[in-house]
């Protein structure tokens, strides 16, 4: 399948990297879900905002995935210059 949008430069915070290692989850697997339009555990209005951002090419794209007791967030900037994998506490 074709990615739904560009990720730009991919970044991961040190805390998110450590968390993914501790919980044996690949950041790449989460990025694959994100770039295909699977935004994970989001409210309906946030899903609609993502669909609009993907369709229009404007606006940030935000995904949230429950991993263990925490969530991992992935945010692609509105200009598609970069995508960051982070924990909510990194925001």
Image: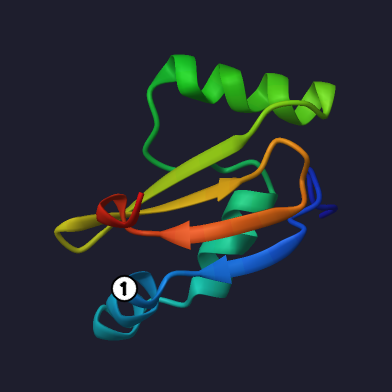
Measuring 55% from the left and 58% from the top, which residue is drawn there?
A: 84
Residue 26 lies, in percent from the top left, at: 47, 77
Residue 17 sits in quarter: bottom left
Measuring 77% from the left and 58% from the top, which residue is drawn there?
A: 8
Residue 41, compared with residue 45, is above or below; it is: below
Residue 22 lies, in percent from the top left, at: 24, 83
Left or right: residue 8 versus residue 36 is right
Give the residue at mark 1: 15
Q: Secondary structure at mark 1?
A: helix
Measuring 65% from the left and 67% from the top, which residue is drawn there?
A: 10
Residue 13 vs residue 7, the one in the foreground: 13
Residue 62, compared with residue 74, is above or below; it is: above
Residue 18 lies, in percent from the top left, at: 31, 81
Residue 37 sits in quarter: top right
Left or right: residue 27 versus residue 11 is left
Which quadrant would the N terminus be assigned to in this image? bottom right
Residue 46, compared with residue 62, is above or below; it is: above
| Circle 1 Cα neighbour tier, 10 Å, few/some/many (<14 / 14–19 / ≥20) | some
Residue 82 lies, in percent from the top left, at: 69, 56
């Amino acid at each position: 399948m074709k990615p739904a949008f560009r990720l730009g430069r991919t970044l991961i915070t040190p805390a998110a990297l450590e968390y993914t290692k501790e919980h044996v989850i690949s950041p790449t697997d989460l990025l694959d879900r994100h770039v295909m339009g699977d935004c994970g555990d989001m409210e309906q209005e946030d899903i609609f905002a993502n669909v609009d951002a993907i369709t229009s090419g404007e606006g940030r794209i935000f995904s949230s995935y429950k991993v263990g007791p925490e969530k991992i967030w992935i945010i692609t900037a509105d200009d598609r210059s970069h995508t960051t994998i982070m924990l909510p506490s990194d925001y």
